[in-house]
Amino acid sequence: VFGAIVRAPEDPILGVTVAYNKDPSPNKLNLGVGAYRTEEGKPVVLSVVRKAEQLLVNDQSQIKEYLPIVGLADFNKLSAKLIFGADSPAIQQNRVVTVQCLSGTGSLRVGAEFLARHYHELTIYIPQPTWGNHPKIFTLAGLSVKTYRYYDPATRGLNFQGLLEDLGAAPSGAIVLLHACAHNPTGVDPTLEQWEQIRQLMRSKGLLPFFDSAYQGFASGSLDADAQSVRTFVADGGECLVAQSYAKNMGLYGERVGALSIVCKTEDVASRVESQLKLVIRPMYSNPPIHGASIVATILKDSNMYNEWTVELKAMADRIISMRQQLYDALSAKGTPGDWSHIIKQIGMFTFTGLNSEQVAFMTKEYHIYMTSDGRISMAGLSSKTVPHLTDAIHAAVTR
Ligand code: LMR
């Protein structure tokens, strides 16, 4: 009965790892997926995460019962505090509902399903370009996806005028997806002044912000600084949705731990929204897994562990920033044609190099360097040892 099924293409990001794994070359380098690696090219488990796991293993009160549909209560409370700030009026007024979800993707999907059922305007505007999974998540949830201008290939920076024009022309009430910080794939973020202008425009038109916060702490190394965009929108008393992921900032990729928060106008609305979120979640996966959320809650509620986490997080962010400088210096030293200053200007895990898909294919074939075909490289996968190899590959690709 399945004989006529057509083979689906590999995922544009996760498929890069599949291809990388098949390559027998000892020089191969995976700069595709956004996953942190050490200077030795190895994945890391943060030592504060190991410590939290040890505490959980030794704690006899830890059981494996089902969590509530909305997840671990402590985790939800602490996650809201992390993104909105400890002194957030929205939290103090109990206007925020937070539900534990399956990392960023799961949080976006639950939020999108909720909006498709209960929100009056089903169009969502996503930046052009954006993370490859965004359009699929929102379309499959039943929203209609449109794009707004975001990146300017000429300046390799923000097309702020285009962004304002497109959001200004959006129908009133439309949903707008915003990357809270460290825009994926471009590494280009609005300044705080620009965020304020975006906020004013969106509020004046009644556009609904849906933030994707996948890199809090990774852009600047500061958890508070990276939450400023979200906090600007919450400070005005208006509504918004936020999807949070702990994949990158706690290195909990495979634990699939994240949260969806919906900021409402009143406590009463928030509690009705929560009741409907439960109806979205229950038939999808019933209730979320315990382990990852317990690790996060253990770390966030203990001030020593929290501080230890921020130090480890900053070290990861700093290593990525130093990789940017090293790659930029190496290309400059080699005299590779072109302006590569965007490598040090862009922020977060990725550099949007400007290399085209043929150049990427050449680098993969000749240099065994794996990256997404849009020219994005994961700086977190690079190390001092591999910078020369990448530099040679980029130089060859642009001079051939
Ligand atoms: C990425 O963009 O590389 C990450 O967010 C991983 C993923 O799931 O695509």
Image (cartoon, grey):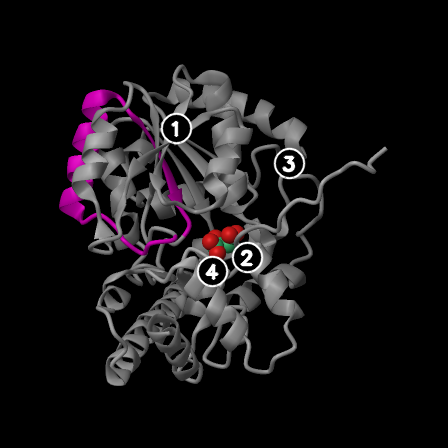
Q: Nearer the viewer, residue 322 or 361?
A: 361
**How far apart in space, not on screen, are marks 3 and 2 (Cα)?**
19 Å
Gap between marks 4 and 2 measured at Cα: 10 Å
Say which label, 3 or 2, has the lower sequence index.
Answer: 2
Horizontal relation, residue 361 to residue 15: left or right: left
Residue on which disc 2 sits = 253
Expressed as whole percent of the image width and height from the top left, the position of residue 284 reads: 65, 31
Which residues, given as a range, are shown in magenta?
A: 185-214
* Distance CA(mark 4)–CA(mark 3): 27 Å
- Which sits earlier in the primary sequence, circle 1 or circle 4? 4
Q: Quadrant of the C terminus?
A: bottom left
Q: Earlier in the sequence, mark 4 or mark 3?
A: 4
Residue behind label 4 places its C-beta within 8 angstroms of ligand 1? yes
Q: Mark 2 Cα within 10 Å, few/some/many (few <14, many 20+)? A: some
The dot on residue 145 is none
Circle 3 packing at 10 Å, graded few (<14), some (14-19), many (20+), is: many
